[in-house]
């Protein structure tokens, strides 16, 4: 607790040094406070930098948690102007490694054994270090006690939780201020954004989750000719330690090395798109941190995915409307895009379809002025989200993750093959998928999926129907009884009035 004032002071000082007050001051709602803010002294150090750059530099100087927050914000085009989102996406969270003795202590504490009883060999020099964890190279024991399977051991930074808790608590206070201080404060939903970030960070702090994500993806791509997922060694995993198969490959950004190995880059680019669409539409579960640092290529030309901390899941409902939107969009059927938005609940039900259709058309038509091969799916989705924003839409986090992943996949694909026609690669996939969803095959599949439940439900059906009828009858009787009571009370009232009138006539006659 004692370092809170220090941290608050560091934040205020950063706001001052990077001139962030200039960015927010015109948007302050209480006029007196806006005038007061104008009187504050200004630092000239970063004056020549663009505002978005100043924000990025400020977040970098505030440390890893703020850097991660900036990275998350960069994926919210529905909240931030495009130039800010672009700048924040440049945030890097490479930080110096922590002491390997500390890493070893964490491993031993988590797995309850001395290091040399866990790994046959352990390289104390980390291969990579980031804000939350660092990765070491090691070997498990072979069955005969010798040096066995090579593995990557990811270890969480020690004492990271209190640091995160402190920064998150300050962010939560900041979020309330933003809501109160700024005209646009409520629309930006700062409290929800911070709460979402909190969930995201806490997920990253549990490496067992990452292990589970890796094994699910691994099962979905068993024997795939396109993608390899490292195996997870659960006996050597815990909340703060992850042990997975070591992967040898060429980082996907090293094009010259890939060419040197005679890897077919065109095919690799197409694989990227197919893997993405398979994950999204067939599995409804996708790796959502597909930046080039997490992708390698094996000698046989297959992708290798790493880092499974962030994944997205989609419901059947989302998948269906996503496919409808893509297909309608590429057929320039904006009416269908608009109705799909209403049907899916992505916009409020009272939205005027014609208005939405016109807005979508205005945003999307310019995109079609480009050759089809240059159109970005990710941009299309981003534009659709931006349009939806004007119609009071709360964009769901899994769709934002999907859009960000799509942009990554496209960026990667076009880097590998500048001629890559994403639409030509994706359309057969989407059309086939839609066909499978609505055809007779889909009906048969649904019937087969539901059948076990029916077998359980059917024998009980007559009893349930009977109970329903009884319940309905009871309700009807109760209604009739209440009605009768009410009518009787009314009758009694009028009878009393008539009796009183008659009595009065009789008395005063
Ligand atoms: N299974 C593996 N085989 C080989 N190298 C690996 C493996 N897992 C991780 N690495 C190396 O460690 C680096 C960091 O791993 P990873 O991305 O999982 O960690 P991280 O802490 O989540 O980093 P970031 O948040 O920056 O993505 C990778 O870029 C890769 O170089």
Image (cartoon, grey):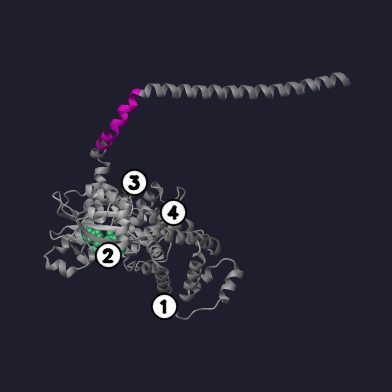
Q: Say whether disc 2 or disc 4 marks the residue closer to the N-terminus.
A: 2
Question: Residue 269: x, y in percent?
Answer: 20, 61
Is residue 32 toward the left or the right of residue 158 in the image?
A: right
- Mark 3 Cα shell of 10 Å, populated few (<14), some (14-19), many (≥20): few
CA–CA distance in space, label 2 to label 4 = 37 Å
- 403 or 222: which is nearer to us? 222
Q: Say whether disc 3 or disc 2 marks the residue closer to the N-terminus.
A: 2
Q: Are marks 1 and 3 in contact (CB under 8 Å)?
A: no
Q: Nearer the viewer, mark 2 or mark 1?
A: 2
> At numbered mark 4, what does the secondary structure look like: helix, strand or loop?
loop
Q: Say whether disc 2 or disc 1 marks the residue closer to the N-terminus.
A: 1
Mark 2 Cβ and ligand 1 under 8 Å apart:
yes
Q: Give the range drawn in magenta.
A: 444-459
Question: Residue 354: x, y in percent?
Answer: 42, 53
- Read off the residue under disc 1: 49
> At numbered mark 2, what does the secondary structure look like: helix, strand or loop?
strand
Ligand 1, image quadrant it occupies: bottom left
- Read off the residue under disc 3: 315
CA–CA distance in space, label 3 to label 4 = 17 Å
- Read off the residue under disc 2: 128
């Amino acid at each position: 607790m004692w370092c809170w004032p220090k941290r608050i002071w560091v934040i205020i000082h950063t706001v001052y040094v990077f001139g962030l007050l200039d960015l927010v001051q015109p948007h302050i709602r209480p006029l007196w406070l806006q005038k007061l803010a104008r009187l504050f002294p200004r630092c000239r150090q970063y004056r020549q930098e663009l505002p978005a750059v100043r924000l990025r530099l400020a977040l970098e100087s505030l440390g890893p948690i703020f850097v991660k927050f900036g990275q998350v914000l960069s994926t919210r085009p529905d909240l931030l102007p495009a130039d800010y989102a672009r700048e924040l996406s440049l945030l890097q969270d490479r930080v110096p490694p922590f002491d390997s003795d500390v890493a070893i202590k964490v491993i031993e504490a988590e797995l309850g054994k001395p290091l040399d009883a866990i790994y046959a060999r352990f390289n104390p020099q980390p291969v990579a270090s980031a804000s939350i964890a660092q990765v070491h190279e090691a070997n498990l024991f072979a069955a005969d006690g010798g040096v066995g399977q090579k593995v990557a051991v990811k270890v969480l930074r020690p004492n990271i939780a209190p640091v995160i808790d402190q920064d998150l608590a300050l962010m939560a206070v900041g979020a309330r201020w933003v809501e109160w201080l700024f005209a646009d404060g409520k629309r930006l939903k700062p409290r929800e954004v911070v709460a979402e970030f909190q969930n995201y960070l806490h997920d990253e702090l549990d490496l067992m989750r990452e292990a589970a994500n890796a094994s699910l993806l691994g099962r979905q791509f068993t024997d795939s000719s396109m993608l390899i997922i490292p195996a997870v060694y659960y006996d050597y995993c815990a909340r703060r330690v992850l042990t997975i198969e070591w992967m040898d490959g060429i980082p996907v950004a090293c094009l010259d090395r890939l060419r040197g190995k005679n890897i077919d880059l065109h095919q690799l680019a197409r694989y990227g798109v197919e893997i993405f669409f398979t994950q999204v539409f067939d599995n409804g579960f996708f790796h959502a941190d597909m930046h080039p640092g997490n992708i390698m290529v094996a000698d046989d030309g297959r992708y290798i995915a790493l880092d499974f901390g962030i994944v997205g899941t989609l419901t059947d409902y989302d998948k269906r409307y996503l496919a409808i939107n893509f297909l309608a969009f590429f057929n320039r059927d904006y009416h269908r895009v608009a109705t799909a938005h209403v049907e899916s609940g992505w916009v409020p039900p009272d939205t005027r379809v014609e208005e939405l259709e016109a807005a979508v058309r205005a945003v999307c038509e310019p995109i079609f002025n480009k050759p089809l091969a240059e159109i970005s799916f990710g941009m299309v989705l981003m534009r659709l989200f931006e349009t939806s924003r004007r119609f009071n839409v709360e964009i769901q986090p899994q769709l934002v993750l999907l859009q960000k992943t799509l942009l990554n996949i496209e960026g990667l694909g076009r880097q590998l093959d500048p001629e890559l026609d994403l639409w030509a690669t994706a359309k057969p996939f989407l059309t086939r998928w839609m066909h499978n969803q609505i055809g007779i095959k889909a009906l048969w599949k649904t019937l087969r999926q539901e059948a076990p439940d029916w077998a359980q439900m059917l024998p009980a059906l007559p009893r349930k129907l009977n109970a329903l009828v009884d319940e309905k009858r009871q309700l009807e009787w109760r209604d009739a009884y209440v009605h009768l009571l009410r009518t009787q009370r009314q009758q009694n009232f009028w009878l009393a009035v008539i009796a009183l009138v008659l009595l009065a006539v009789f008395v005063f006659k």
